Structure formats: structure tokens, C-alpha cells
Amino acid sequence: HDLDHRGTNNAFQAKVDAPLAKLYTTSTLEHHHFDQCIMILQTEGNNILQALSPDDYKLVVRYIEVAILSTDLALYFRKRGEFQKLVETNEEHWSDPTKKELLR
């Protein structure tokens, strides 16, 4: 999930006005890691998703994106807090796609 990591964090990227921070305004490094992943998956010999239907391909790529973006600790702590609130309300929310997204 850390393809082509720069050895810094998102805050540093923003503070030094790095090109990546200009390209991706939130979850800077995670967006870059995702783009690197997709670039690799689209190269000949690495395209393990090529047999998927267009709809399945989009779904799998979305799951990969969510998984990689979720490694941004700022997002993790926010999502964890939202999930804890749902659990504490003791109500069933899992038919709501946005609530299901908290588990990814």
C-alpha cells in the first residue's frame, strides 16, 4: 500500500508545497500510492484484472482505492470514531452503503 513512498508524511508534503500535495489535496501520499498501483496493474504482464467485466473491474478498483486510502491515519481515526458511534447507538445501519463503507 506504500508504493513509491517518499519517506515523509502528508503534512510535510503540504508544508513544503510538494507537487504531489498540489495534485492530491487530501490523503496526498495514499492517492499517489493508489495511482502507482493502478499504473502497475495496467502494464503488460501485471494486468491480473483484465478478465473482469467492466463493472467488476470498476468495483475491484474501487475496493483497492478504499483499502489504500484507508491507510491514511487521519481517515482511519475519523472512520473509527464514526463506527464507534454507530455501535454505541445499538441500531442497525448496515443497509446504508455509507455505513458499510466504514468497515472497509
Image (cartoon, rainbow, N blue to C red):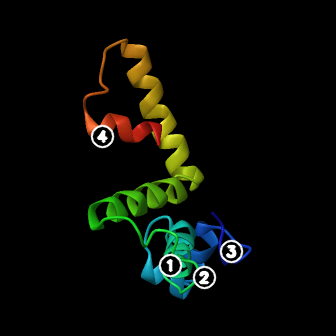
What residue is pinned by disc 1?
21
Q: Amino acid at mark 2?
A: Val
How far is disc 3 from disc 4 in space, using C-alphas? 29 Å
What residue is pinned by disc 4?
98
**Residue 23 placed where, x, y %?**
44, 82
**Residue 65 placed where, x, y %?**
45, 61
**Mark 2: few/some/many CA within 10 Å (<14, 14-19, 20+):** few
Residue lying at the far right in this picture: please name it. 7
What residue do we see at 54% from left, 59% from top?
Answer: 68
The residue mark sitting in front, 1 or 4, is 4
**Mark 3: few/some/many CA within 10 Å (<14, 14-19, 20+):** few
Could you say whether the residue bearing mark 2 is in a helix, strand or loop? loop
Could you say whether the residue bearing mark 1 is in a helix, strand or loop? helix
Among the 4 quarters of the image, the one containing residue 14: bottom right
What residue is pinned by disc 3?
5
Q: Amino acid at mark 1?
A: Ala
Counting residues from the start of the chain, the first of labels 4 and 2 encountered is 2
**Mark 1: few/some/many CA within 10 Å (<14, 14-19, 20+):** many
Mark 1 touching mark 4, by CB under 8 A? no
How far is disc 2 from disc 3 in space, using C-alphas? 16 Å
Residue 16's mark?
Answer: 2
How far is disc 1 from disc 4 in space, using C-alphas? 27 Å
Q: Is residue 100 left or right of residue 17?
A: left
Q: Establish if 3 lies above or below 86.
A: below
Q: Amino acid at mark 3?
A: His
